[in-house]
Amino acid sequence: MLKEIRPALVVLLMLTAITGLAYPLAITGLAQAIFPAQANGSLIERNGKVIGSELIGQQFESDRYFHGRLSATTAPDPQDASKSVPLPYNAANSGGSNLGPTSKDLAGRLKDDVAKLKAENPSGSLPVDLVTTSASGLDPHISPEAAFFQVSRVAKARHLPETTIRALVTGQIEGRMWGFLGEPRVNVLKLNLALDKLQS
């Protein structure tokens, strides 16, 4: 019986060593050597301090900053672990709200958000990504249209000409990946950092 089991155990140990140790270590080493920034989370630093990642959005509430997509991520309620509370851009709980088109909660939120954004920019055409959440809840990008929609608010809050802010947004637009994948987009954290640099 040992004669039949022994080859199976040897193969199991070999595959465990190859797929569980050698392969992950080799891939990690290659990633660190070839793409160190991406392998370490595409972190963004300012004055030697990590302030975020290019890959995960952050919540900006001040009128002085551009706002990203809404996030529906949650966290356990500290008062009652059986419930959850909103915690935007919570990478530990990535996901959408799962509210459907017949949801009264969703309809109410959309109505309030649209009214608020229309008051902010009555003449602009409202981009859909400013009132909808992404599937992951972590999206760091908005469309160029969503960024341009916010130019007047940011310019007013910072006492800068709209043309200056509009030019800054234009300079931050990232094109399609490899020229054909995805859509043009703007990384909100990078845009806000460029905005702060503009006034420093």
Image: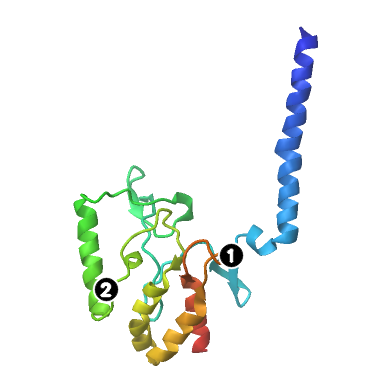
Residue 50: x percent and y percent? Answer: 58, 69
Residue 141: x percent and y percent? Answer: 46, 67
Outermost residue to the top: 1
* Secondary structure of residue under mark 1: loop
Residue type at the position of mark 2? Leu
Q: How many badges with numbers are in the image?
A: 2
- Cα gap from disc 2 to disc 1, whole angstroms: 33 Å
Identify residue for label 1. 178
Badge 1 local density, few (<14 within 10 Å), some, or many (20+)? few
Residue 137: x percent and y percent? Answer: 41, 56
Locate residue 90 relative to residue 20 in the image: left or right: left
Q: Is residue 198 above or below residue 179?
A: below
Name the residue rendered at 39%, 81% in the picture: 64
Locate residue 7 relative to residue 145 in the image: left or right: right
Cβ atoms at labels 2 and 1 below 8 Å apart: no
Q: Is residue 104 above or below residue 193?
A: above
Q: Quadrant of residue 12?
A: top right
Q: Is residue 104 above or below residue 35?
A: above
Residue type at the position of mark 1? Trp
* Secondary structure of residue under mark 2: helix
Badge 2 local density, few (<14 within 10 Å), some, or many (20+)? some
Q: Is residue 48 above or below residue 28?
A: below
Name the residue rendered at 44%, 51% in the picture: 94
Dot 2 or dot 1: first in sequence order is: 2
Residue 67: x percent and y percent? Answer: 39, 72
* Dot label at residue 117: 2
Q: Quadrant of the N terminus?
A: top right
Nearest the viewer among 132 and 200 is: 132
Nearest the viewer among 171 and 195 is: 171
Name the residue rendered at 28%, 75% in the picture: 125
What is the basis of the colouring in this image?
A: rainbow
Mark 2 or 1: in front is 1
